[in-house]
Image: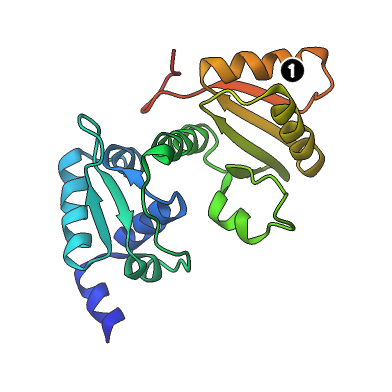
Amino acid sequence: MAGTAVETLVSRRDLDALGWVGEQYAVQADQLGLFLDCTPRTVQRLLSRLRKQRLVEVRRVLIGEPAWVIPTVKGLRASGLSFGAWRPTLGLLAHVAAVTDVRLHVQSRSPDSEWVCERLLAREKQSPQEHLADAVVLLEGRRIAIEVELTVKSKRRTRAIIDELIGRYDAVLYYCAPGPQRLVSELAGDGVWPSLGIRQLPERGGGVRR
């Protein structure tokens, strides 16, 4: 009966959007608008419907930034996902938002690609020591690991991550803030990783971050 009640008040498109949000842990409201290609007012109406059914929480976490849309366990189940509920922490917000910006960027340029989110990759992890990519893109029969890097890691750690991902995937694509981009570019300078690509972080809605 509960499932029937949900479907009479929200649409299948609403639940599909909710599933996309759940794959990303959570997204900011303007990112949801970009995904749906709709106006902020339409996003607010969608969120109102989902909140009334207790399928999402909408939280303003940082002053001056868009609100976060966070699926509840009920929302995850309604959208067909079996993940646990995610609780935002300040240390993770920027990275979670950046990964979603990259997803929007990749899928706008390669609409035939398939994005495999980190939450799904975690279920396939072979050992606790295995490095988990931020996502994997399936495109034209290739598996491309996506790494989104906002902070500078040590050279040793970065080299180890790249070596591991290169060994497991057809290609590795780094989207970096300026500091990490310089480091990864320096490490890649000797050409030992021909399947490594390095990009600037995309701006939300188009372009790249400077």
Q: Amino acid at mark 1?
A: Leu
Is 110 above or below relative to 59? Answer: above
Q: Residue 186, position in %: x, y?
A: 71, 13
* Quadrant in the rendering for residue 168: top right
How many numbered tags mark residues here?
1
Circle 1 residue: 187
Question: Which residue shows up at 25% across the image and 56% down it?
Answer: 57
Q: Residue 101, position in %: x, y?
A: 43, 34
Q: Residue 128, position in %: x, y?
A: 70, 55
Question: Which residue shows up at 44% across the image and 69% down it?
Answer: 80
Secondary structure under badge 1?
helix
Question: Which residue shows up at 77% across the image and 12% down it?
Answer: 189
Is 25 above or below relative to 200? Answer: below
Between residues 63 and 46, which one lies in front from this camera angle? 63
* Quadrant in the rendering for residue 61: top left
* Visual colour scheme: rainbow
Q: Quadrant of the N terminus?
A: bottom left
Between residues 92 and 166, which one lies in front from this camera angle? 92
Q: Quadrant of the C terminus?
A: top left
* Quadrant in the rendering for residue 90: top left
Between residues 47 and 110, which one lies in front from this camera angle? 47
Image side of residue 153 versus residue 23, left or right: right
Q: Residue 116, position in %: x, y?
A: 58, 50
Question: Which residue shows up at 40% across the image and 56% down it?
Answer: 86
Is 17 above or below relative to 132? Answer: below
